[in-house]
Amino acid sequence: MKLPDYLMTLAEGIDIKVCTNRGYVITPNCVRRCIRVPQEEKLVLFEIYSHYNDEKGYAFPTQQTLALYLGISASSVSKHLKSLEQKGFIKSMGGKGKSKIYFPSFDLMNNVYIILSEWFFFAIQVIRKNLHDSMGAEWANLLLQFVNIKTSTENDLYGKYLTKLRKEMDIFHDEIILDFLNCMKEYVEQITKQPLVINWEKEIKLAIEKKKQLDKSTANKRKRNRANGRPTYTEDYAFV
C-alpha cells in the first residue's frame, strides 16, 4: 500500500474503534517548511484550515477550541493568530472570542515569507551540488545561522530581504532575489572556505524547465487516474 493511500485510510478512521478526529488537512510543504513561521504558528494555521467551511468561506473556531485541540494556552493561540495575520496567512473579522471569524489567504504564492523561503531551499539544492563532497553536512547546519530561524524580528540579514520584498516586490523582485541568492553563495563561501562558481540565471532557467516537464508529467498522471477512477490528490483530497 502506498503511503498516501494508507494515510487516507487512517484519516477515515476505518481501523480505529472510536475515531473522533477523522479527516485530514492539506498542508503544502512550502507552508509546512516556511522559514520564519514558528511551528506553533503553523499548527494554529493548520487548525484554521481544518475548520474552514467551504460554503461560508471562512473558519470560525473559538480561540479556546484551538487551544484545546493544540494543547496550548488561549493566550498563545491569540498571539499566533495575530502573527499569522501580520504575515499574510490569514485575515480575521469580528470581535474577540466566539464572534471572530478567520479567512485563510488564497494568495500565498505572493506571500513574501513563502517566496523567500522557497528561494532559500532552491539555493540550498544548487549550492549542495556545487560543494565538494568532503564538506559533509556541517555547512547546512551553519546555514541555520543565516536564516536565524529562532528570531521573530526582521532586523537580521534574512529579515531585511523579507522587508525588501514586501516593499519593492512589484518593481524589483528579480533584482532582490538575485541579490539574495548571491548573498547566500557568499555566506557559504565564507563558512566553507570554498569558492563556488554558480550562474544563478542559468540555474533558474534549468529549474523552470524541469518544473514544466514535471507539471506535464503530473497532468498526464492525473488524466490517467481519472480514466481509471483513482484519486488525483488535488480534486479528491479536500479540507475536512
Image (cartoon, rainbow, N blue to C red):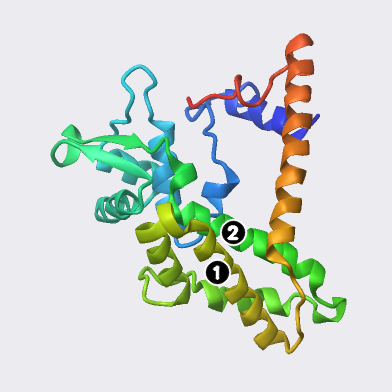
Q: Tell which residue pokes out farthest to the front in this image.
A: 171
Q: Residue at x 73, y 21 (%)?
A: 222
Q: Residue at x 86, y 76 (%)?
A: 133
Three-letter residue code for mark 1:
Phe
Q: Is residue 41 left or right of residue 209?
A: left
What label does residue 119 carry, if any? 2
Q: Residue at x 68, y 73 (%)?
A: 140
Please report whichever mark, 1 or 2, sits nearer to the chain's N-terminal start. 2
Q: Position of residue 239 (x, y in %)?
A: 49, 27
Q: Residue at x 48, y 57 (%)?
A: 173
Crowding at mark 1 (Cα within 10 Å: few <14, some 14-19, many 20+): some
Q: Is residue 146 left or right of residue 90?
A: right
Crowding at mark 2 (Cα within 10 Å: few <14, some 14-19, many 20+): some
Quarter of image, res 227: top right
Work out whether residue 212 or residue 97 is closer to the camera in this orientation and state it.
Answer: 212
Work out whether residue 117 or residue 56 is closer to the camera in this orientation and state it.
Answer: 117
Quarter of image, res 91: top left
Q: Position of residue 220 (x, y in %)?
A: 78, 23
What label does residue 180 carry, if any? 1
